[in-house]
Amino acid sequence: MASIEATYGWEPTTFSAVYHGKFSYAQYAKGENIWAVFPAGLRTGAPFYVLATFTKNAQGIENGPYQGLKPKLIVNHQARTFSAKIEPGSSVDQYYWFEDSWSNDGLTLELQMYNKPGDKLDKYTLQLQGTA
């Protein structure tokens, strides 16, 4: 797959992109799938979704889905970093939030997971699956 930058360029990044990796977190997830979806591009103000499966979630439900909607993406293109933290007072109540960076060619995404209090949890490497 050609790099995103060579194909689309970074300014503006209005293409949609889907990244995939494996997700393991404490006793809740062991080798599960995780996706990061940028349906309107990797740009400030665009929506961002994280989809994963917990092997067993905090309520004891096996194969419980995790769907995280992050309605306000903040992107720094020069540093190739992004943040998808829910702002205080938002109507969206999410326990986890994410930030980090993508590779120079756009083929790899490093996704750092945080909990609601802001504790740094695990970091995941996801690979680009496709763009549109």
Image (spheres, rainbow, N blue to C red):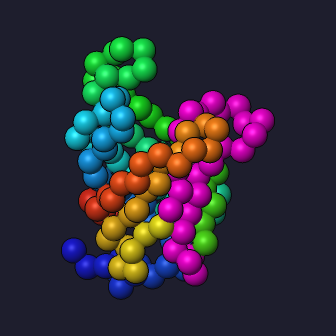
Of all residues shown, which one is farthest toward the top? 60
Q: How many marks?
A: 0
Residue at horizontal 42%, vertical 15%? Answer: 59
Q: Position of residue 111 (x, y in %)?
A: 43, 56
Q: Write down the quadrant of residue 118 in the picture.
A: top right
Q: Position of residue 122 (x, y in %)?
A: 42, 48
Q: Is 113 placed left or right of 33 in the picture?
A: right
Q: Write down the quadrant of residue 2 in the picture.
A: bottom left
Tell me if residue 54 is in the magenta stretch.
no
Q: What span is in magenta? A: 77-100
Residue at horizontal 35%, vertical 29%? Answer: 28
Residue at horizontal 38%, vertical 64%? Answer: 109
Q: Is 17 placed left or right of 24 in the picture?
A: right
Residue 13 visible (yes or no): yes
Of all residues shown, which one is farthest toward the right? 89
Taking depth in this image into account, of 49 and 113 the one nearest to the observer is 113
Q: Main secondary structure of the magenta part?
A: loop
Q: Is 122 placed left or right of 29 in the picture?
A: right
Q: Position of residue 1 (x, y in %)?
A: 21, 74
